[in-house]
Amino acid sequence: MHPLTSQFLPLSPAALHILMALAGEDRHGYAIMREVARQSDGQCRLGPGTLYDNLKRLLDKGLVAESAKASDDDDPRRRYYRLTNLGRQVLAAEIARLEEMFREAKLGLAGTKPRRA
């Protein structure tokens, strides 16, 4: 793991979901909330307070930046967010960390014997 990215890990669940929602395209706040709900099959729903508190932290850390993306029919006050290169690296590092954690857990489960009643 790269030392630059490891200082950001582990990500909080909300931060992880926000970065994942921004991995495919730039999005505004409400679109991020909808994408998080879609990706988690409705299991995770971010409220505005959680979303914007986390976005501010991610902006301050340089993992997310404001984007100039907007369409003609968009409200000019709407802010779009995008992953930075560092944000992409941190997201990739967190995914690798979680994959390794789950791999270890699966190996542990496979090695356990069922208890007899």
Image (spheres, rainbow, N blue to C red):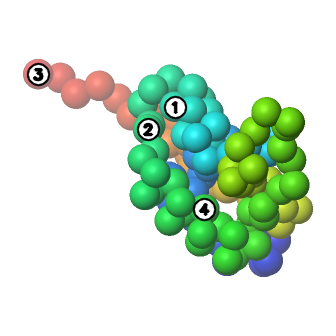
Between 65 and 97, the one nearer to me in the picture: 65
Disc nearer the start of the sequence (2/4) = 2
Between 78 and 62, the one nearer to me in the picture: 78
Q: Position of residue 24 (x, y in %)?
A: 81, 37
Above or below 38: residue 3: below
Q: Is residue 109 visible?
A: yes
Disc nearer the start of the sequence (3/4) = 4
Q: Do callouts 2 and 1 mark residues in contact (Cβ within 8 Å)?
A: yes
Disc nearer the start of the sequence (1/4) = 1
Residue appearing at x 60%, y 62% in the figure: 55
> Mark 4 — residue?
55
Disc nearer the start of the sequence (1/3) = 1
Q: Distance between the Cα atoms at labels 2 and 1?
A: 5 Å
Disc 2 secondary structure class: loop
Disc nearer the start of the sequence (3/2) = 2
Please state if 33 lies on the left or on the right of 67 as rendered: left
Disc 3 secondary structure class: loop
At label 3, the amino acid type is Ala
At label 1, the amino acid type is Ala
Disc 4 secondary structure class: helix
- The quadrant the N terminus occupies is bottom right
Disc nearer the start of the sequence (2/1) = 1
Which label was assigned to residue 105? none
Q: Is residue 9 visible?
A: no
Quadrant of the image occupied by residue 117: top left
Which label was assigned to residue 37? 1
